[in-house]
Structure formats: C-alpha cells, structure tokens
Image: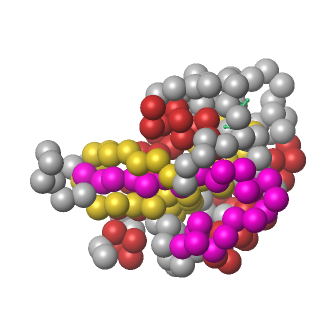
C-alpha cells in the first residue's frame, strides 16, 4: 500500500456561507457531523484517499475558512483544481440563486479548462425545503454539471458526491493524464 503511486487531485468546495460546505467535508473525511460547526475549521484543506475503479487517488479538498462570506477567495484557492463542488442549501432559496455567481467565479479563476463541477443540494433532511429537486436538476443540466442531493447530517449522497466527481475527473483525459 505504502508504495502505491497516488495521483493527487485538488477539489474545491464553494458556495454561500452556511450551506454546509465544512459539514460535508467533515462527513466525507471523518464520517462525523457537528451541529455546532463554527464557521471555520481552520485548515486550508483535508486529504482523503479513495479507490475509484481501480485507481488510487489522493484528494486534497480545499475548504474556505469563512472568506466566502466576503467574496474574498483568492486566485490561489482556485488554481490547478481538477474538480469543484458547488453547494447550496435546499431550505434557503437565496443560496441556490447565488450558484450562478459561484460558477462565474469558477470560470474566471480556474486554470484547468475542463474542471469538473458537481452541484450538491444539501440539507435534504430538513422539513422546510424551498428548492425542489427539479429546480436543482434543471440548473445542473443548463450548466452541464453533475448533480446530487445530500445531507451532511444523515450522510445521504455525501460519499457519492465525491466519488462521482472523481469518476468524472478520471474520465477527462486533460485532467487525469498529467
Ligand atoms: P459552511 O459555512 O458552508 O461551511 O456551513 P457549515 O458546514 O458551517 O454549516 C452551517 C450550519 O448548517 C451548521 O450549523 C451545520 O450544523 C448545519 N448543517 C450543515 N449541513 C447540514 C445538513 O445536511 N443538515 C442539517 N440539518 N444541518 C446542516
Ligand atoms: Mg465552512
């Protein structure tokens, strides 16, 4: 295992403040959920190994430390990322409306032409939903992104979100070969 050659992939998590970005990351890397999750987990990124279709990959997943609140993510945050997870909160329509802005940001700063995008509709465990699954799907189709509904709280969709993103990256030669 130790001498396996690992490709490292840089994955970003973006979206409005409070949508559950850090919670999704914590669920994925540590299988944990902290309802008291404060704004910042205080790290630039977390790593996790995955085996996808026989490919050993190491993910370096970059979380924002609250800067998204002020739209002050720097170009270095985006640089060289192969994949991006765009999160909105299904119980907060405004966070869904802002997705287009985040996509623009991504187009502006990402340095890889074919960066793979996964839209994650988070907090589906909650009762007071404001964004339907169809609206999410429609957005994803329009902007040619992957789409999944998820809950960092219940685990629904979390593992699949990351796995399907990586699968798509592996199938994109420009992103995988180097
Ligand atoms: P971030 O600002 O996007 O990183 O969002 P956080 O991960 O800090 O989450 C913001 C708040 O939403 C926290 O109180 C979380 O516990 C809560 N939260 C995150 N994901 C979920 C979820 O899937 N379901 C529920 N019910 N609450 C969530
Ligand atoms: Mg956060």
Is 60 colored magenta in this rendering? yes
Residue at the spot 35% in from the left edge and 73% down from the top edge:
173
> Which colour style is shown?
secondary structure
Say which quadrant the N terminus sits in: top left
Residue at the spot 73% in from the left edge and 45% down from the top edge:
88
Q: For the view shown, which residue lies furthest in the right direction?
A: 94
Residue at the spot 62% in from the left edge and 30% down from the top edge:
151
Q: Quadrant of residue 30?
A: top left
Q: For the view shown, which residue lies furthest in the front direction?
A: 42
Q: Position of residue 61 (x, y in %)?
A: 49, 52
Q: Is residue 3 visible?
A: yes
Q: Is residue 153 above or below residue 22?
A: above
Closer-to-camera residue (40/4): 40
Residue at the spot 51% in from the left edge and 26% down from the top edge:
32
| Residue 110 falls left or right of residue 36 | left
Q: Position of residue 156 (x, y in %)?
A: 55, 28
Q: Position of residue 112 (x, y in %)?
A: 50, 76
Q: Which quarter is ligand 1 in?
A: top right
Say which quadrant the C terminus sits in: bottom left
Q: Is residue 128 above or below residue 168?
A: above
| Residue 134 falls left or right of residue 6 | right
- Start-end of magenta stretch: 56-79
Q: Is residue 147 visible?
A: no
Closer-to-camera residue (143/107): 107
| Residue 128 falls left or right of residue 159 | right
Q: Is residue 130 above or below residue 32?
A: below
**Numbered label tally:** 0
């Amino acid at each position: 295992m130790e001498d396996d050659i690992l490709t490292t992939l840089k994955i970003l998590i973006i979206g409005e403040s409070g949508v559950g970005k850090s919670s999704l990351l914590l669920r994925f890397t540590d299988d944990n959920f902290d309802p008291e999750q404060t704004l910042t987990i205080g790290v630039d990124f977390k790593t996790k190994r995955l085996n996808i279709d026989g490919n050993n990959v190491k993910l370096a997943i970059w979380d924002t430390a609250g800067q998204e609140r002020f739209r002050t993510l720097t170009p270095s945050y985006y640089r060289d990322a192969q994949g991006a997870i765009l999160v909105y909160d299904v119980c907060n329509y405004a966070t869904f409306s802002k997705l287009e802005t985040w996509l623009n940001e991504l187009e502006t700063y990402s340095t890889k032409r074919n960066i793979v995008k996964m839209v994650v509709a988070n907090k589906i465990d909650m009762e007071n939903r404001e964004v339907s699954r169809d609206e999410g799907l429609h957005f994803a189709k329009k902007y040619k992104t992957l789409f999944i509904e998820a809950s960092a709280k219940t685990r629904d969709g979390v593992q699949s979100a990351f796995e399907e993103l990586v699968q798509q990256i592996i199938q994109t030669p420009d992103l995988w070969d180097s």
